[in-house]
Image: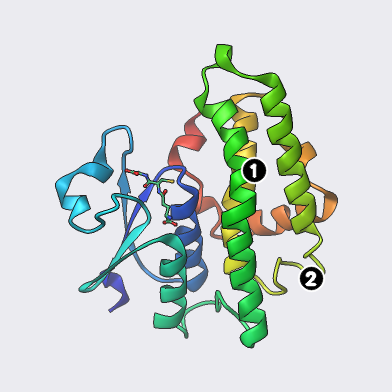
Amino acid sequence: MTMALVLYYGSGSPYAWRVQLALEAKGLPCERRLLSFSAGDTRKPEFVALNPRHRVPTIVDGDFVLYEANAIVEYLDEAYPSHGIRLFPGDARRRATVRRIVSEVDDYTTEATDKVIDELLYAKPEARDEAKLGRARAAVAEEFAFLARYLEQDFLAGPLSAADFALYPQVAYMDRCHQRVPSFDAALLLPPALAAWKRRIESLPYLDATIPPHWRAA
Ligand SMILES: N[C@@H](CCC(=O)N[C@@H](CS)C(=O)NCC(=O)O)C(=O)O
């Protein structure tokens, strides 16, 4: 039954990455279809027919199509409660805390990391504004320090949850910036507690399988 799941994803999409992590943590068999942004795959009629907003991630589960990463992660947890871990574990308050942290990552962390990514990965090197980059970098450091305060236990909301899977791609993106622009020292952005959390996430047996394919080659 679960083999009917199909995931459309794009290499390096932090939103798709959340869903990949969720699928792995739940041990759900899934057919993965990699779309190429540069080839315009998300705008092709057959994909727009599934997701009129032409974005990844999008899943198909039998005759049900769903897009928007957070909705997908919640759906997988509710539709397949006995598979793998609960992505929203615990009681109503714990689950609310998971959702709160996911919202924080969407609204605050992503705003900060996007500015660094824009300067380092998308602006032409000759057009790079070092002062702007410095401010963006400081905002990410401040945000990571803020989130590190949540780490009283191993993971952001206590046990491993959807909150960790929302944040990890943003943290990994800073490493990608370092890979592309070695002078950008991503490791220095992480307070010790968040660095230890990152190592815990990276030691999950399935993490490696979710790393964006084009990041390996570069
Ligand atoms: N709010 C969406 C964001 C998804 C998103 O922005 N996806 C981008 C890649 S990171 C995309 O598919 N862009 C292709 C396009 O817009 O055609 C979600 O949470 O799923």
Q: Residue furthest top?
A: 126
Which of the two residues, 209 or 157, is positioned nearer the viewer here?
Answer: 157
Location of residue 141 in the rendering, given as x and y in whole percent from the top left corner? 76, 43
Location of residue 169 in the rendering, given as x and y in whole percent from the top left corner? 57, 50
- Residue in the picture at 26% in, 37% down: 40
Q: Residue furthest bottom?
A: 91
Location of residue 107 in the rendering, given as x and y in whole percent from the top left corner? 59, 55
Which of the two residues, 205 or 210, is positioned nearer the viewer here?
Answer: 210
Q: Amino acid at mark 2?
A: Gln
Q: Is residue 206 left or right of residue 192?
A: left
- Disc 2 is placed on an element classified as loop
Q: Is residue 211 left or right of residue 163?
A: left
- Mark number displayed over residue 153: 2
- Residue in the picture at 56% in, 15% down: 127
Neighbour class for label 2 at 10 Å: few (<14), some, many (≥20)?
A: few
Instruction: Determine whether 90 is above or below 27 in the image.
Output: below
Instruction: Determine whether 181 is above or below 188 in the image.
Output: above
Q: Quadrant of residue 63?
A: bottom left
Task: Report the number of discs.
Answer: 2
Q: Is residue 87 left or right of residue 69?
A: right
Instruction: Determine whether 55 is above or below 185 in the image.
Output: below
Neighbour class for label 1 at 10 Å: few (<14), some, many (≥20)?
A: many
First in sequence: mark 1 vs mark 2: 1
- Residue in the picture at 38% in, 56% down: 57
Q: Nearer the viewer, mark 1 or mark 2?
A: 1
**Residue that numbered label 1 is attached to:** 112
